[in-house]
Amino acid sequence: MAGRRRAYWPKLRAVLDADVAYRVGKLARGGIAELMQDLHPSIELTENAITVASLVDGDGGGLTLVPCMFIWPHLWVELGLAGEPSLTYGARGIGTLWQDGDGDTEEENALGALLGRSRAEILVSLRLPRSTTDLARSLGLAPPTVSSHLAILRRSGLVTCWRSGRRVLYQRTVVASTIVAACGHDNGASGDGRTAASSLG
């Protein structure tokens, strides 16, 4: 039983990684206003403050954002021991968490005919961010083989990558998600924040 539970953690981690990457991108593009825009309906950004409809009242010097898989649609505000608040919110992509991207379908064959079977499988698997090791384990391929395919997909503008701690995570670009959707295989690559993970491009 414990082994089955452990098997879910890579999927949970992928959704959280995607949310963090999405938020960092919004912060880089438009600052704090852009970052907080779609975080939660109960959050209001004024000129000098972030107001949250909450019973907790605090005035800290910083704010830690904590994406969570188990809190949506609620929001959790907590004051730490040092008085700096944290905001726990529902991560984007929860709706795609248990979508099954496996199976030898006609649509996957169409994508495989375009890119080659292994690259097609990798691209379909990158609905959420994954490392080379994650991909190799789930697809039954050798890590060097996956790495080689990812390098080609990255040079072609179909995947992007970034570092998260010691791991390098890969995810489809918007262009790749469009191709996958055009082949009819995947409809969870874009859309509302609660039903799909962000595609970075």
Image (tube, rainbow, N blue to C red):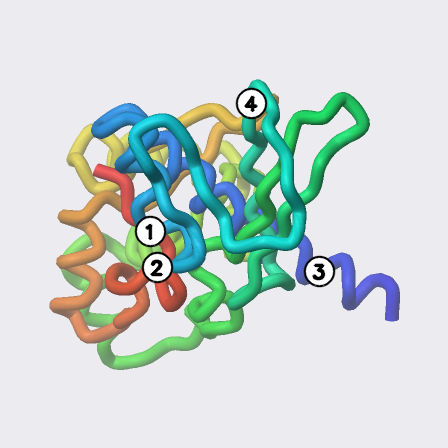
Of mark 1 and mark 4, the one earlier in the sequence is: 1
Residue furthest bottom as drawn: 106
Q: Secondary structure at mark 4?
A: loop
> What separation in Å lies between label 2 and label 3 (alpha carbons)?
24 Å
Residues at discs 2 and 1 in contact (Cβ within 8 Å)? yes
Q: Amino acid at mark 3?
A: Ala
Q: Amino acid at mark 4?
A: Gly
Image: 90 above or below 156: below
Q: Which residue is mark 3?
A: 7
> Which dot, 2 or 3, sits closer to the camera?
2
Of mark 4 and mark 2, the one earlier in the sequence is: 4
> Which dot, 1 or 4, sits closer to the camera?
4
Circle 2 residues within 10 Å: few <14, some 14–19, many ≥20: some
Q: Is residue 163 visible?
A: yes
Of mark 2 and mark 1, the one earlier in the sequence is: 1
Residues at discs 3 and 4 in contact (Cβ within 8 Å)? no
> Which dot, 1 or 3, sits closer to the camera?
1
Q: Which residue is mark 2?
A: 193
Q: Secondary structure at mark 3?
A: helix
Q: Amino acid at mark 1?
A: Asp
Nearer the observer, 81 or 165: 81
Circle 4 residues within 10 Å: few <14, some 14–19, many ≥20: few
Q: Secondary structure at mark 2?
A: loop
Q: Which residue is mark 4?
A: 62
> Which dot, 4 or 2, sits closer to the camera?
4
Give how far across and how far down residue 112 sits, in percent: 24, 62
Q: Quadrant of the N terminus?
A: bottom right
Give how far across and how far down residue 110 sits, in percent: 18, 70
> What separation in Å lies between label 1 and label 3 (alpha carbons)?
30 Å
> What separation in Å lies between label 2 and label 1 (alpha carbons)?
8 Å
Give how far across and how far down residue 16 sits, in percent: 53, 47
Q: Give the numbered dot on residue 38.
A: 1
